[in-house]
Amino acid sequence: MRVRSLFIMLGVVVALGAVLYVTTRPRPAPPVEPRPYVWLVDMGDLGRMSISLPTQGKSETWVKHEDQYWYFDKPQGPKVDMQRWGGGIPLILSGPAANRRISAGASDAQLLIYGFGNPQMQISLAVKDGKTIHIVVGDATPDHQAHYIKLVDSREVFTVDSSWYDVLSRLVLDPPYPPPDQK
């Protein structure tokens, strides 16, 4: 009788242990959705980049010369100061990963709400194959953590980090001209 009771108690303990194991084990994290890209081009294919800030009346344009360096697109345009340019600007402009898609088919009223009626920034990118990509950046989101962005001919609206917008607007407001002592 004692041995039988011992086996029953052992069975109950094993069953409780199994239930405890199954109910308390960590669940696998849900798969992470890849962030959508607003546009995507190889940064080596960029030949001309133009950024304008219409609300401030300022703009800058840069072209890549045959020596593979970027220059200001002005007569006798100086070479970009690579210390300030950092080489990352073409990468940033080759295609930002969006935080999220806001709308796949925004109405005219929605586009106005997002600030596309009076955009904060306009970007034009000329690619080697002769294609030009036109982008508009609308208002900041209510929490000011992101900006609304879309391609000109699209009604698909995304958000990108405000830091992306800040870096590009600084290029226009404080252009990376070479130091005066550099030719």
Image (cartoon, rainbow, N blue to C red):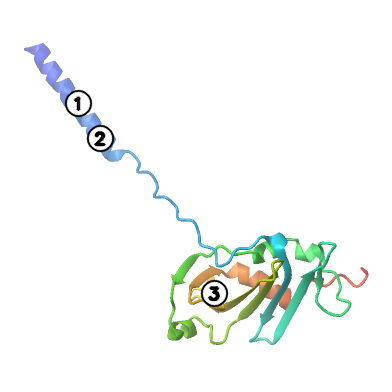
Query: If the image is split into quadrants, where does the C terminus sit?
Result: bottom right
Instruction: Say if mark 2 contacts mark 3, CB within 8 Å.
Output: no
The three-letter amino acid code for the residue at tag 3 is Lys
In this orientation, which residue lies closer to the viewer: 76 or 17?
76
Q: Is residue 151 left or right of residue 72?
A: left
Is mark 1 in CB contact (under 8 Å) with mark 2?
A: no
| Residue 4 x/y as whole percent | 9, 15
Mark 2 closeness class: few <14, some 14–19, many ≥20 residues within 10 Å = few
Query: SS class of the residue under badge 2?
Result: helix
Say which quarter of the image contains residue 44. Answer: bottom right
Amino acid type for the residue under numbered disc 1: Val
Sequence-earlier tag: 1 or 3: 1
- Which residue is identified by label 3? 150
Residue 20 - label: 2
Calculate the distance from the C-alpha at mark 1 to the C-alpha at mark 3: 61 Å
Q: Mark 1 points at which residue?
A: 13
Determine the residue positioned at 57% across, 87% down. 118
Q: Residues within 10 Å of mark 1 (few under 14, many from 20)?
A: few
Closer to the camera in the image, 54 or 42: 42
How far is mark 1 from mark 2, CA to CA? 10 Å
Query: Real-space Cα distance between discs 2 and 3?
Result: 51 Å
